[in-house]
Image: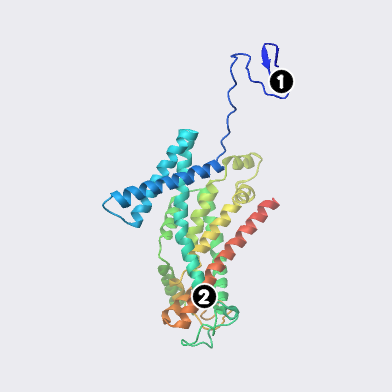
Amino acid sequence: MSAVTGGTQQAAPGAEVVWAESGGGPPAPPERRIRPNSIRWSDVGVMAGSGLAAFALVWLLYTRLAPTSGTLGFVLLWFTAFVVIYWVCERELEGPLVAADKAIAVLIGSIAIGLLIPLLSIVLFVAWKGLQALSLHFFTDNMASAGPLAGPSVGGGYHAIIGTLEQVALALVMSVPIALATAVYMNEVGGRLVQVVRTLVNAMSGVPSIVAGLFIYAVWILQFHHTFSGFAASLALSILMLPTVTRTAEEVLRLVPDGLREASLALGAPEWRTVWSVVLPTARSGLITAVILGVARAVGETAPLIMTSFGSNSVNPDPFNGPQQSLPLYVWQQYQLQLTGPLARAWTGALVLIVLVLVLFTAARLIASSRNVAR
C-alpha cells in the first residue's frame, strides 16, 4: 500500500518516488553523462558490428557484382563503408553530435595507425637484420684489425659510437645557446631585424646537409688549413641543428601566456629578469623538445661527415685532432663494400644508432619530467 503525503504519492518504504507532484506522470530518466575519450563495451560492440557489416557489404558488392577487384580497392571501400555505418549506428544511439565526434575520432585514429605501421615496419626490419650480428664485441672493438673480407664476428663499432657522442655533444654546446638566444630575440625582445633574422632562419631550414658539409670543408679545412676532425663534423651538424631548434623554440615561447609576463613586469622585474625567471622556466619542457628535434635532425646525417670527419678505423677520443668515425658514416662505409661481413656490421650499426637516439630522447624526457616535479 502507498501513502499520499503533501500531494505527492509515495511508494512503500525502500521504493523510489514514481509520481511527480506537478504532472502526475513518471519522472524523466536521469541524463547520462558523456565523457570524451571514454570507451565502453557498447562502443566496442557497435564498432565491431559496423566493421563486420561493412566487410560483408563490400565483399558482396566489390567481389561479386563489381567488374573490378583488388586488395587496395577492397580495403579503401571497406574503411569508407565502416566509417559511414559506424556514424549511422552512433547517430541512432547517441545523436548526431556524438556520432560526428566518434566518427571523426575513428577516422583520425585510423590515419595515425596507418602512419605508425610503416615506422614500426622500418624499426622491426632494422632490428631483425641488426640483431643477427649484434654481440658484445661490437661495443668493445674497432675496425683497425678487420679487413673487408672479415666476418661479422670480427671488428666492431666502438670507435663510431664514441665519435657520434662527441660530435653530437659538441654540436649541442655550440648550437643550442645561439638558437635559444635567437628565439628569445625574435619573440621577446623584438626590433627592426626580427624579420630579417626570421627569414634567414627559415632559409637555413631548407639548406641540404651536404651544403653544410661543403661550407665547413671550404672554410675550416681549406681556408684555415685545419685537418679532418670530429670538431669539423660538429660544426656542420650545428649548422643543421640551428634552424630546427630556433624555429621550434620560438613557437614554444609564443605559447607562454602574456599574463605571466605582465605580472612579472608589474611587480617591478626588468625585462631580462622576466625572460630568465618566468618565460624560460615556463617553457622548459617545450624547449627540451626543441633540442630533441635538433638532435634528431643532425644525429643521422652522413653527407656532411664525409667532408669533415672523414672517418677512421681506430678509436680517436680527441675530436679536435685527426679524422674521427661516427655511426652514420660507419654504416655508409660498411654498406659500400657489399660483402657479407660489412653488410651485417652496417645493419648492426643502424640498429645501435636507433637505440642510441631513443636512449638520448628518453633521458631528455626524464630530466624534463624530474625538473617539473621538483618545481
- Viewer-side label of 1, 2: 1
- Residue 125 x, y percent position in the rendering: 48, 68
As rendered, which of 229 and 33 lies closer to the eye? 33
Residue at position x 56%, y 43% in the image: 41
Where 259 sits versus 169, above or below? above
- Is residue 187 toward the left or the right of residue 87 in the image? right
How far apart are labels 1 and 2 at the CA level? Answer: 77 Å
Tell whether label 2 touches label 1 (CB within 8 Å): no
- Residue 117 x, y percent position in the rendering: 46, 59
Give the residue at the far front of this rendering.
1
Q: Say the numbered circle drawn on residue 12.
A: 1
Residue of label 2: 348
As rendered, which of 242 and 142 lies closer to the eye? 142
Residue at position x 46%, y 87% in the image: 149
- Residue 243 x, y percent position in the rendering: 47, 59
Write down the quadrant of residue 96 in the picture.
top left
Give the residue at the far right of this rendering.
13
Mark 1 Cα-neighbour bin, 10 Å: few <14, some 14–19, many ≥20? few
Amino acid found under the numbered disc labelled 2: Thr
Quadrant containing the N terminus in the rendered view: top right
Amino acid found under the numbered disc labelled 1: Ala
Where 162 sits versus 365, above or below? below
Where 117 sits versus 3, above or below? below
Residue at position x 46%, y 44% in the image: 49
